[in-house]
């Protein structure tokens, strides 16, 4: 039977995110699985595996803020911006005071612009950027705005700098590390990267990817599944009856006062975030409440429906 929900995995260094999904499929004997938020093979840490209808939650899980532990090696630049790439520049690393490193973090806090790495999965003229890069073709990827919520230096042991980063979706920590290293003078590249949390989920609650199929059998993994409803704990929920649940699953667009009669004003659900509709503990749909106050009975927007 195909399970629905998510599993938290602590990915090992050297594994691809796709490889972890394959191990889950084989061990649990299931067909439909994916992941939210790719980790590069050299990176470790939290990888959210989507099972069955859990794949419908991908965009919601990927939109959460994330936290990483990272190590920058100053004085050596690579074409991939990490330790897997070809060295393109080497310079001596001067003495840099820890206070100077700390002060530099202020330039990278808040909303910043960054250029994605040439070796990335972004598409450029119909092909992945890394395909162009591997052929030696220089491409100009557009800058994008990202939000760095926190940037903390945990250690300065030149030529290495250790930091903790909390950032928005779409942030390339490789680009952040490269830009930060250049701002200090000698430049550098990322040597370690570990995702420690994504939204409400922590790597401390994850199963080790190396244990999947060994210490973590298919039966053991079944017990690690987080249900569809619990996968989005930050969202408000509304209970619906069987008849209404069936209407929603058939694509019927209900009005808000049919779902929540006698709601308060201002409507606590009309905060722009999706609302979870439950029948008991079973997630029926994600909907968006209309923005209104008073006795307006505007129709809700169906965002995702779960069978």
Image (cartoon, helix red, strand yellow):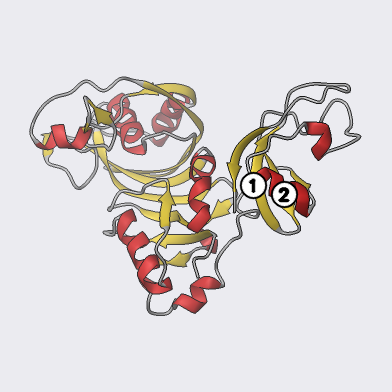
Q: Image height check: is 244 above or below 207?
A: above
State the SS at label 2.
helix
Decide if residue 284 is on the left or right side of residue 41.
right
Residue at 50% over, 63% down: 206
Decide if residue 28 is on the left or right side of residue 241.
left
Relative depth, front residue between 110 and 213: 213
**Residue corresponding to mark 1:** 249
Spatial distance from mark 1 to mark 2, Cα to Cα?
6 Å
Image position, residue 254 (x, y; %): 74, 35
Image position, residue 71 (x, y; %): 34, 46
Q: Which mark is residue 43?
A: none
Residue density around tag 2, few if under 14, some if 14–19, many if 20 or more, within 10 Å: many
Q: Image height check: is 297 above or below 243?
A: above
**Residue corresponding to mark 2:** 245
- Contact (Cβ within 8 Å) of mark 1 with mark 2: yes
Relative depth, front residue between 305 and 212: 305
Relative depth, front residue between 266 and 181: 266
Decide if residue 65 is on the left or right side of residue 143.
right
Residue density around tag 1, few if under 14, some if 14–19, many if 20 or more, within 10 Å: some
């Amino acid at each position: 039977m195909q399970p629905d929900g998510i599993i938290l995995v602590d990915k090992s260094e050297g594994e691809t995110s796709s490889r972890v999904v394959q191990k889950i499929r084989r061990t649990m004997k299931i067909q439909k699985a994916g992941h939210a938020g790719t980790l590069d093979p050299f990176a470790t840490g939290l990888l959210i595996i989507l099972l069955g209808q859990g794949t419908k939650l991908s965009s919601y899980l990927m939109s959460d803020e994330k936290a990483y532990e990272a190590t920058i090696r100053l004085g050596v630049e690579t074409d991939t911006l990490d330790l897997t790439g070809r060295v393109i520049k080497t310079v001596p690393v001067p003495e840099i005071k820890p206070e100077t490193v700390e002060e530099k973090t202020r330039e990278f806090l808040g909303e910043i612009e960054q250029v994605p790495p040439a070796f990335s999965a972004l598409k450029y003229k119909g092909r992945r950027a890394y395909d162009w890069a591997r052929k030696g073709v220089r491409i100009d990827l557009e800058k994008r705005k990202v939000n760095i919520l926190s940037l903390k230096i945990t250690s300065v042991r030149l030529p290495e700098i250790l930091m903790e980063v909390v950032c928005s979706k779409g942030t390339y920590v490789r680009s952040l590390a490269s830009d930060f290293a250049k701002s200090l003078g000698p430049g550098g590249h990322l040597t370690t990267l570990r995702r420690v949390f994504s939204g409400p989920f922590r790597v401390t609650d994850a199963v080790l990817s190396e244990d999947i199929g060994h210490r973590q059998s298919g039966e053991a993994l079944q017990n690690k599944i987080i249900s569809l409803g619990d996968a989005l704990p930050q969202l408000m929920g509304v209970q619906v009856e069987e008849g209404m649940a069936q209407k929603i699953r058939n694509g019927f667009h209900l009005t808000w006062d049919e779902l929540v009669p006698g709601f308060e004003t201002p409507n606590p659900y009309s905060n722009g975030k999706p609302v979870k509709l439950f029948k008991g503990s079973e997630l029926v749909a994600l909907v968006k409440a209309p923005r209104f106050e008073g006795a307006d009975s505007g129709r809700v927007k169906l965002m995702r429906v779960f069978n």
